[in-house]
Amino acid sequence: MKRKHDSVIIVGGGPVGSVAALILALKGIPVTVLEREPAPVIDYRASTFHPPTLDLLEACGATEALLAMGLLAPTMQYRDRQQGRIAEFDFSVLRNDTRYPYRLQCEQFKLVDWAHRRLAVIPGARLLFGHAVVDVAQGEDEVVVRADTPDGEGLFKADFVVAADGGRSMVRKALDIDFEGFTYPEHFLVAGTRFDFRARMPDICSVNYTADPEEWYLLLQIPDMWRIVLPVDARREPEDAVQEASIQRSLQNLLPRAEPYEIVVRAIYRISQRVAAAYRRDRVFLAGDAAHINNPLGGMGLNGGLHDALSLTERLARVWHGASGEHELAGYELQRKPAAVDAINAITQRNKRLLEERDPEVRHRNLEEWAAIAADRERAYRHLLDASMIASLRRCGMIP
Ligand SMILES: Cc1cc2nc3c(=O)[nH]c(=O)nc-3n(C[C@H](O)[C@H](O)[C@H](O)COP(=O)(O)OP(=O)(O)OC[C@H]3O[C@@H](n4cnc5c(N)ncnc54)[C@H](O)[C@@H]3O)c2cc1C
């Protein structure tokens, strides 16, 4: 494909856009990131990085940075609120499949901050805060991006655009691409506390999925705190659910103690399972949440988005440097969309159903099944290949 501007624009300087920009810049491609926010945002959403993501991020240096900033979680538990631990899975069974047989727990804003600092010292890379993209138009040999900037409206021209502008992607809407799927009626609440749950619940590990027909929860250890993810009944007002008293009630229900919990982080999210009808329009590509969103039970959204970034940047770089042609770009959607539909969305939906099941008989069967899988080495191994996204990355040909 001919190049008119010698430039790639990335819309969105979140984790997917920043890592995509860094990889392109390291491959010698001039790149400009347009980020709407005036300054970096402390976004606590994602905290789990899966083993093959760490394998794939080695080349750009992100794995070394994540290992330095994060916490290793060598095991994962499925629990029941009444019965306690049902199954524990040890990631070390994956040691022949990955160089990192564990989950790495690190808040996503730390990865973004690291990538921004790396970009700042690479010639040809620009990161522009306070640039909110409002429109994208394509001619035969260029893309024109219009943005509100601190100095008024700006026009930016590029050969290719990567839209990594999140679930509400302006670029996806400008291209009139459907975001197919559904939104859950309930919200998800996230609270963070420095209280050390393991001191009072010695049999938990750093990643605990706990089933309960009334209020399932996910209890996660991250470097500076423990995080709890809970559903908020669809009949409740989200503003009410983030109030101190409401969060204290949920935490006391999880582990009663005489003192109130110190809550250092709180946020509420609307959650959907959606995949874009197309990942590409000519010279514009969708990646990350702009292309697919899912519930956080399994920690797959950002991991999947980073896999998109890795696939797309590799392809763009081959075309850019003349090593490959148009079919390389056509292969992006073929490789990444099935992973979003058949693996990421399917597994996260199944995880949610298992945690929230209300029918006592089905619940009983599910818990027995979890225990049976964990007790059988071969089944546990297969389960972890799926849960760690190794199986889906193999199916789409991104890892051997
Ligand atoms: C509670 C919760 C927990 C989660 N935990 C995990 C986890 O453990 N592991 C995991 O893999 N995933 C997890 N996720 C999902 C993960 O947070 C997202 O998949 C991830 O943030 C997607 O990254 P992104 O860069 O595609 O989009 P975003 O992080 O949304 O970044 C988009 C960026 O684009 C910018 N932007 C938006 N519009 C414009 C515009 N018009 N112009 C310019 N810039 C724009 C935004 O300001 C932002 O910086 C979780 C999600 C939630 C809600």
Image (cartoon, rainbow, N blue to C red):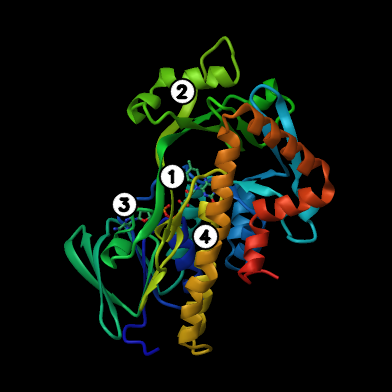
For label 1, count other residues whose C-alpha is less than 10 Å away and answer few (under 14), some (14-19) or many (20+).
some
Q: What distance separates the C-alpha of mark 4 from that of mark 1? A: 23 Å
- Residue at image x 43%, y 20%? 246
- The mark nearer the N terminus, 3 or 4, is 3
Which residue is labeled 4 in the image? 340
Please give the residue where the numbered disc 3 appears in the rendered image.
Answer: 37
Badge 2 marks a residue whose secondary structure is: helix
Label 4, secondary structure: give it.
helix
Q: Nearer the viewer, mark 4 or mark 1?
A: 4
Quadrant holding the C terminus: bottom right
Label 3 and label 4: CA atoms lie apart by: 27 Å
Amino acid at the residue labelled 1? Asp
Cα distance in 3D space between marks 3 and 1: 12 Å
Judge the density around disc 3: few (<14), some (14-19), many (≥20) Cα neighbours within 10 Å: some
CB within 8 Å, label 3 to label 4: no
As rendered, which of 376 and 324 lies closer to the eye? Answer: 376
- Residue at the image position 52 percent from the left and 88 percent from the top: 324
Residue 43: give its label. 1
Q: Amino acid at mark 4?
A: Ala
Mark 2, mark 4: which one is toward the viewer?
Answer: 4
Q: Decide if ligand 1 comes within 8 Å of the CB at mark 4.
A: no
Apparent side of residue 14 relative to residue 250 in the rendered image (left or right): left
For disc 1, does the CB lie below 8 Å from ligand 1?
yes
Q: Earlier in the sequence, mark 2 or mark 4?
A: 2
Relative vertical location of residue 342 with respect to residue 42 in this rendering, above or below:
below
What is the distance, in whole Å, between disc 2 and disc 4 at their CAs? 32 Å
- What amino acid does circle 2 point to? Ile
N-term-proximal mark, 3 vs 2: 3
